[in-house]
Image (cartoon, rainbow, N blue to C red):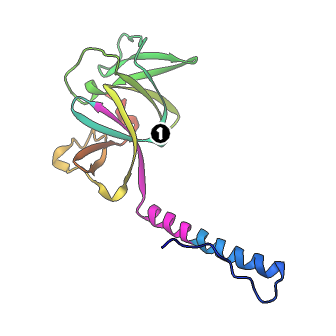
Amino acid sequence: MAATNKIELPNSGLTEDILAQFLDKAQAEVNQVGAAENSEKNGELLHLVTFQLGKEEYGIEIASVQEIIRATDITPVPGAQSHVRGVINLRGKIIPVVALRRRFNLPEIESSDAQRIIVVELGQKRIGMLVDSVSQVIKIPAGVVEEMPEEATNAVENFIKGVGKLDSRLIIILDLNLSLLAA
């Protein structure tokens, strides 16, 4: 049976009393929505951009992402660290591009139309991250994210915030920090 939005008229018939009753009902609905939103916040959702490197799926928090562009016109820089693919000119700003495959010691692949550069902000710096492809934007509950076991990472170069378990998928969530650029 469908809920009705009937407001019973008060005996006084005064407009103020009718409006007060209507506003009380509206406030109760707002309180219900607020409670649902708070429980969602307490259960905190992570808003991620997901991308592929080989068969693995990675994610970064969307708040860090400035934009996603095609992987074209990367200018190599002589003497740059091995994982720095080069630089791009993005609307007059020179931005270094880190090849995440190289950074994570994954085998190189040939360039493809699916490759993208995810431009992120790290403090005052902007960098581009070259990835195989960008998958989607998702929200996952923070409760499904577990820390990466110490045995699975290098303590000096730990770029992993955690691993999100979503249905049958594992999403490696990166911790964007300046060590991503460091040698």
**Rendered image quadrant of residue 130:** top left
In this picture, which residue range is highlighted in magenta?
32-52
Q: For residue 107: magenta?
A: no
Vertical relation: 92 (above or below) 40: above
- Residue ID at (46%, 16%): 88
**Mark 1 residue type:** Ser
Q: Nearer the viewer, residue 12 or 1?
A: 1
Q: Nearer the viewer, residue 123 or 8?
A: 8
Q: Is residue 3 left or right of residue 170?
A: right
- Residue ID at (48%, 21%): 95
Q: Give coordinates of residue 38: x percent, y percent.
A: 50, 66
Q: Is residue 21 left or right of residue 59?
A: right
| Residue most extreme to the front | 1
Q: Give coordinates of residue 59: x percent, y percent.
A: 35, 40
Secondary structure category for the residue under label 1: helix
Q: Is residue 66 left or right of residue 146?
A: right
**Rendered image quadrant of residue 39:** bottom left
Q: Nearer the viewer, residue 80 or 130?
A: 130
- Residue ID at (55%, 67%): 34
Q: Is residue 15 left or right of residue 58?
A: right
- Residue ID at (75%, 78%): 20
**Rendered image quadrant of residue 117:** top left
Vertical relation: 167 (above or below) 30: above
Give the quadrant of the C terminus. Answer: top left
Q: Give coordinates of residue 61: x percent, y percent.
A: 42, 43
| Residue most extreme to the bottom | 11
Name the residue tied to disc 1: 64
Q: Give coordinates of residue 174: x percent, y percent.
A: 33, 41
